[in-house]
Image (cartoon, helix red, strand yellow):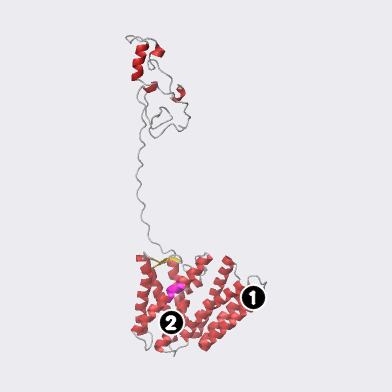
Amino acid sequence: MNDSSWGAPPQAGYWGPSEQGPVQGAAPAGPAYDAHNAQQTRPMPIAPDVPAHGGDQDDDRGAARLSGSLFRDDTPSAGSLGTPPQKPQEPMPSPVPQPAPAPQKKSAGRDLGAAIGVGVGLGAVIVASLFVVKAVFVGVIAVAVVVGLWELTSRLEERKGIKAPLVPLAVGGAAMVVSGYVRGAEGAWVAMALTALAVLVWRMTEPPEGYLKDVTAGVFAAFYVPFLATFVAMMLTADDGPRRVLVFLLLTVVSDTGAYAIGWRFGKHKLAPRISPGKTREGLFGAVTFAMVGGALCMQYLIEDGTWWQGLILGFAVAATATLGDLGESMIKRDLGIKDMGTLLPGHGGIMDRLDSLLPTAPVVWLLLVLFVGSG
């Protein structure tokens, strides 16, 4: 037998008479003795050398479980195979339980103080220009359109390599707003067509590679920003134009506020997780509720000849279009891989991040007010 496979040398008095000589009082050796004992005992099998890692000797039945450092799960008894008794390992002390982390408070994700301050400042400028001189407010719309176009075309070039020509877009966009105020819908459509033509011609001065995607993005930008903003200028042409614009702005802000307040507090079910993970169905319900209540009050007290039930319809439409506009720009920003369109407004992002819900809402409010109380 290979002693190395057992982990201990043979000890005197263990292996029997064959190695220690005759034992006093033992039966005499001879054929009869050997035959009798042969029936009572079995020869011990010779175990091969066991590799240091245990090899395949430890089968499922445990028939060849060896002592020593090869099999640490077995603790041999005192004196077994001549191996001195081993002190059992002391159990590892259980880890000290750590206190549970304190629950984190919900966060709005932006600098709320800066957002409120910038919002109040913008509101003051808008209201002052709206009720003092109408032409000044038209200029405010034109400036917002040009800055929004700059932000949109800059992000398209940075993230996608799309070079929508900014110069014809900016000139045509400002002309669209003025034309809508002076000539109404007809003037807005004519300016839109001329702006699209200017984009096509301007881009011809550069190499043809990428022409199609550049002019497509340019025409899209012309429609998305200045053309939709033209309906705000068209609201202003009515006799009670400043109040119509004020109702339009108030209801959009109220809708966004309701969506934020209810969604932040009670929101659990995602509205469109692939587009905007932060928006919830509960937030949409808050937007609709707030906007409908606000619409009823505004139509009853701010719009001449308006009624509360018209305000309910108007508020519902504003909540729907504002939400769709917000999701639409979220889709654009997700495709571009950005969080905000710009950094011009602390706490808000860029101008386009504030126009996202206003732009698609403007033509809907203009149309409903014309249907409810006329264009005068």
Q: Residue furthest left?
A: 25
Provide the secondary structure element on which disc 2 rests: helix
Residue numbers of the magenta segment: 321-326
Q: Is residue 220 left or right of residue 116?
A: right
Which mark's residue is nearer the viewer, 1 or 2? 1
**Figure check: 147 above or below 92:** below
Q: What residue sits 50% from the left and 72% below the top? A: 352
Instruction: Name the quadrant containing residue 208.
Output: bottom right
Nearer the observer, 232 or 367? 367
Residue type at numbered disc 2 = Val
Q: In this orientation, does residue 242 appear?
A: no
Q: Position of residue 376 (x, y in %)?
A: 44, 90
Badge 1 crowding class, 10 Å Cα cut-off, few under 14, some 14 to 19, many 20 or more, is many
Whole-percent x, y for residue 283 in the image: 38, 69
The residue that disc 2 covers is 365
Provide the residue designation for mark 1: 203
The kind of residue tagged 1 is Arg
- 240 falls in the magenta region: no
